[in-house]
Image: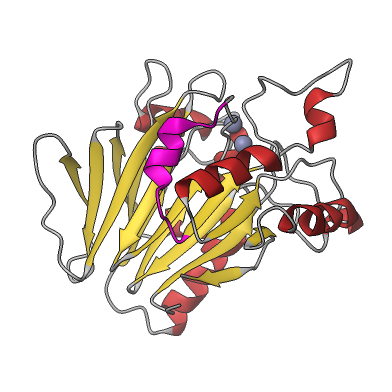
Amino acid sequence: MSDDFRVTFWGVRGSHPVPGRNTLYFGGNTTCLEVSVAGTTIIIDAGTGIINLGNKIVGEYFGAGAKGPLELTLLFSHLHHDHTQGLPFFAPLYLGQSKLYMFGPRNFNNELQVVLEQSMIPPNFPIDFFHSNSIKNIATIKENNIIVLDTDDRTPRLLNKFYEKAEVQDSTILIRVLSDYSHPANGVFVYRIDHSGKSVVFATDVEGYQFGNAKLISFTKKADLLIHDAQYSREQYTALPTPRQGFGHSIPEMAIEVARLAEVKHLALTHHDPTIPDGQLKRNQTRYKRKFPNLLYAREGLTLSL
Ligand SMILES: [Zn+2]
Ligand SMILES: [Zn+2]
């Protein structure tokens, strides 16, 4: 375990935020993960959890005397509301000292930049994305891309993995991308971040397949931590008259199957269904730890060191 590579959960709910007394323990914000690696901050998804993260980042930046630009890398798994709706309230977006490197998928025929601009435009929101003060570097990426971050330089570089070989030094952070097609209607990106022999895979909004999701298992092989969707309970998944099969989310059994076959060390389940209260999630955690001992249900504020 090293403090040089940590993940912190800022939002662990799927679909929509759920404030209230039933979600105080696991939290009610939608998806956002902070990955702190070798002094660099990588954020995955901009659900409502990113609002508190942004406030913390800006507080620390000014608290430290604000020397130099504030550089952040922001990855999008996909562009559904529960993964983008915190962005208009993300404080670094409005700071002229912020340099934001954003990477994510195309949405049908629209590039990432267009989708983000359209999500923040009057009359839907009073400030348009274009006029926010941060310097933005936005790239639509594909599965054949690798993002390389050298910790001395901090500017992410985009490579084509079939064309260019990443030169890997001790300080290099590699971000790999997998396209998963189990989520309607445009699929999702799963990200794998490797640094100095440690790795984390973030697989939200994926649904398991019969015989296991082979592509995901191969991508996740021997990761130290797999963070995997487990929105539904087994009962919800098959319950009539509205079974959730085909909705693009998993049940814990599917996540455990990937974790076992990929031989990961630790498994964190996330994207909890908004209707499942804390008590039920705690009971489920106890139930599924019997099947995979190094398992936990992600909760807001939890930091794991890799
Ligand atoms: Zn989602
Ligand atoms: Zn989604």
The range drawn in magenta is: 211-224
> Is 51 placed left or right of 2 in the picture?
right
Q: Residue at x 76, y 59 (%)?
A: 26
> Is 108 placed left or right of 122 in the picture?
left
Q: How is the image coloured?
A: secondary structure
Q: Identify the image quadrant of the N terminus.
A: bottom left
Please say whether residue 281 is one of the residues in the magenta stretch.
Answer: no
Please say whether residue 218 is one of the residues in the magenta stretch.
Answer: yes
Query: In the displayed structure, would residue 213 be above or below residue 293?
Result: above
Q: Residue at x 28, y 68 (%)?
A: 196
Query: In the displayed structure, would residue 217 be above or below residue 169?
Result: above
> Is 212 placed left or right of 242 in the picture?
left
Residue 88 drawn at (x, y percent): 54, 45
Residue 303 drawn at (x, y percent): 58, 70
Residue 108 drawn at (x, y percent): 42, 16
Query: In the displayed structure, would residue 25 be above or below residue 212?
Result: below
Tally of marks: 0
Q: Residue at x 89, y 56 (%)?
A: 279
Quadrant of the rendered structure where residue 195 is? bottom left
Residue 133 drawn at (x, y percent): 38, 52
Q: Residue at x 85, y 40 (%)?
A: 275
Name of the residue lying farthest toward the bottom:
64
Query: In the displayed structure, would residue 82 be above or below residue 74?
Result: above
Give the quadrant of ligand 1: top right
Mark yes or no: residue 81 visible.
Answer: yes
Q: Nearer the viewer, residue 134 or 303?
A: 303
Mark yes or no: residue 131 visible.
Answer: no
> Is 26 placed left or right of 37 in the picture?
right
